[in-house]
Image: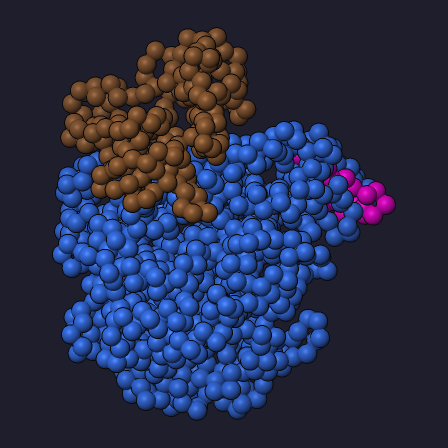
Amino acid sequence: MAKTAEDMAGFVTDLVDRHGAERSQLSFVLHEIQEKYDFLPEQALRDVARLMEIPLTDIYGIATFYTSFSLSPKGRNIVTVCMGTACHVRNSKGILEEICRFLGIGPGETTEDKAFSLETVNCLGACAMGPIMVVNGTYHGGMTAAKVPQILKKYEAGEALQEEEETYRLSSPAELAAYREKMRPLRYPDAPSVSVCGGTGCKAGGSAEVIEAMRLELRGADEDGKVILRATGCHGFCERGPLVTIGPDNIFYQRVSPEDVPEIVSETVLNGRVVERLLFQDPRSEEKSVHKEEVPFYASQMRQILGPNGDLDPYEIKDYIARGGYKGLAKALFEMEPEQIIDEVDKAGLRGRGGGGYPAANKWRACRQARSVDGVKYVLCNADEGDPGAFMDRCLLEGNPHSVIEGMIIGARAIGATHGYIYVRNEYPLAVRSVIQALEQARERGLLGEDILGSGFDFDVSVSKGSGAFVSGESTALMASIEGRVGEPREKYIHTAIRGLYVRPTNLNNVETWANVPLIINEGAGKYASVGTEKSKGTKIFSLVGKITNTGLVEVPMGITLREIIFGIGGGIPDGKKFKAVQTGGPSGGCLPESLIDTPVDFDRLTEVGSMMGSGGMIVMDEDTCMVDVARYFLEFLCDESCGKCTPCREGLKHMLDIVNDVTEGTATPEQLDLLVELAEVVKDTSLCGLGQTAPNPVLSTIRYFKEEYREHIEDKRCPAGVCRALVTYQIDSEACTGCTRCLKACPSGAISGEKKEPHLIDAMKCDRCGICLEKCEFDAVIRK
Amino acid sequence: MKVVIDGQSVEAEEGWTVLDTARYYGVDIPTLCHKEGLSPYSACRLCVVEVRRGERSKMVASCSCPVEEGMQVITKSERVLKARRMILELMLASTPNSKTLQCLASKHGLTKVRFKGESRDCILCGLCVRMCDEQMMGGAIAFAHRGVERKVSMPFHKTPEACRECGACLYICPVCELPCQGPMEPGELCNACLDELRLDPFPSGD
């Protein structure tokens, strides 16, 4: 025991020595302790407080504020259930309940034998594969409640899969480097090349094995090493992953498994013949598409920001440079004055893609003009993509980090900033890795650091890791978090452009906004602004998820209608169900009904109709989605994520949730609904930060467009979508029931009785209304009312 | 600089907040988390006022919003009073025994709490945390956890070395006092001093 304590003291001392005692390093130090011990031992925190000279109360505050940290030991297997919006509409709650029942613990708890710890996370960004359960880092996509026991039993017995090794790199660094150096002028030759999507969605579908198989197969088949194999970032069409594209003609294969690899290599790569069965087939027209551009999902998009993802090795700066990367930076440094850069961004009409839609040039100008006591100014990149259901920023950072970095350097030049930070969520380990590597490579080549490209301009970027708090995406909270304090917002009557990070002028834009900057400088504001509507220019990336045929990331010109996205690119609603609503803007946005489906995607139009652009989550809901339940879901999310500083947000949201819970349980009165609206207006009016000010939107928009559904819950005690448990019952149709006993065996509460080959019965008193019987029945004999 | 408060044009100094200016001229704005000598915290939101600029109007926390030349401030519009009453109602739902809150309720004509009640004894105004840190140079207590779980806490629930047991935190707490003595049913309020204290909800000029 004494030795362990000594070890720990030594570990902490080394850690603080390595990171330095600067307060901004605190989150790195805490993350490393958490990683080593799986929790933050009290003694370790006391040592940190002493060595870094930070009050222990502050460290304790931080350790209890962020969800990535834990003060008690965890189990051997960590089960994480994604509670993002897309997973929610696909019944992640039922899965969580089944896990709780199976393990006998609640979220945040550990089983007595320390075999399992159960956690929830507000969106992992693997929405297309939802609902998602992660055990020890292995993604289990497309989960159902019925699959839970079988998967968890495997882990319990210890025969589970080892944690997937992240095989982004295809061989040893030295081998790879030598190979690349030799091939440098030939990174994009006419010879065949293979791109395998390594985005998180495809990885959940097994693309790491495909990449490995491809590497081995090519080593044997392609003796001269002519074929270039790339493990790229996300291609967007997550629904059909793992995706493989064969260049130079862009032959497009979907749902590829390692077994398909030898055929792909021998037929397509070596002989240019198409493997028919791997092509995409349109479920409506039944037509097959050979090339990527012909696939309907891609054909109607405009992928000027996302497009390069499919052709780039994100860990290889040569790819980015070979495709014209850093040309915009050279132009901005040598051909333009800083004011000209801002004017160009102004003319392009670039508005912030993080949600607010504030004109980027106005922010930049204010920050450029602001005086700094010591000349230090900052530019920040907000990569704390916390909106459940949105994952475009993760894909950009994972797939094309240099585009973001180039944008930041150009912005820094325009503003006169000396240092930058990229603030990335801890839930995105791959993005953290790719950004750190990209920064390193840019530095090596003189594109970052001192005297960039010999221009005399100095600017460097550091990475700062978030620790699991949605509110830390708010600008002042984000800055507090970078400074090593609790990530809670403060009033900003004095803008952060004047007094931001470390009380210096600071400019914050999100990942997608920065990625647009090189394009504007490269191609000119005129060309950029020719796309879009009068006040919303360029393209916007959306993550199209929920009850939709083609889930994935789509990039569309501003001004396109919701209908074109959902029914055109998205291919409509699966299983012949009816469209009900689309949710945009995440927890700050709203739900739009069918009557508004011809609304164009434009910052101002979406706000007018009671939703907002937000960072780009677009969650499609069908007739099986209960709108009251959706409002409840977002309130639960927000209560969980509110920092708790101001009264209206902390107390107001709690009581809003109370009332909406009453509605879903059929115990609410019509007066309570009026009180809900009254309260919502005050929360909106008086909350301290953007989180609270927009938090009532999901409730207000569902009341505005789906009031009848609220009325049915309150007055008729009925949930028309059959979602709210207290208001539904399950019965067995004795005509249809064959007595197969599948439901009886599966029922976790023992509510089903009946003899084999005889019609079964559900005991309503015992029934927990979990719906597993409905999932298990193959004869449509279970009826939900 | 010139500032207009409730229709009255007054002189304010650079660096003053809206609350400083209002109090200087005797305009009453209620506060809970604000105390002279401690940094503004803007959390209780009871001090919200309306700031109008042409057609546009927004709600700001007067304790931290700096005055600007020509600013139009309204401290008792219907929108402001409605918000204050709702904030008090929310606080009373969680902390019904506080005499400070009960008196403020009477003053604002609030007679009923429509939300589910709890009986907590902290409104998370953070006065004690700032008092300890900024005036006593202690840094012994801080906020821990977040959202509805937020509480003022000592690390690991043990009194830290930094605490000198000076009692300043107790001294400044608006809830650690003799509880309200009025008779109360759940959801009802004391309101013993309702008639004496009640504000004119719609002052002239609005």
- Which is nearer the eye, B192 or A658? B192
Q: Is residue A653 magenta?
A: no
Q: Range of the magenta residues? A: A726-743
Chain shaded brown: B
A418 vs B83, nearest the viewer: B83
Measuring 37% from the left and 60% from the top, which residue is drawn there?
A510
Q: Main secondary structure of the magenta part?
A: loop
Q: Which residue is depicted at the point 25% across and 62% down?
A: A368
For the C terminus of chain A, the quadrant is: top right
Query: What percent of the width, then of the height, locates residue A431?
Result: 36, 62
Q: Is B142 displayed left or right of A687 in the figure?
A: left
Return the x and y of residue A577 as percentages of the image width and height: 71, 57
Q: Position of residue A576 (x, y in %)?
A: 73, 60
- From this viewpoint, is residue A719 visible? yes
Q: Residue at x 44, y 90 (%)?
A: A191
What residue is at 70 percent from the left and 76 percent from the top? Answer: A286
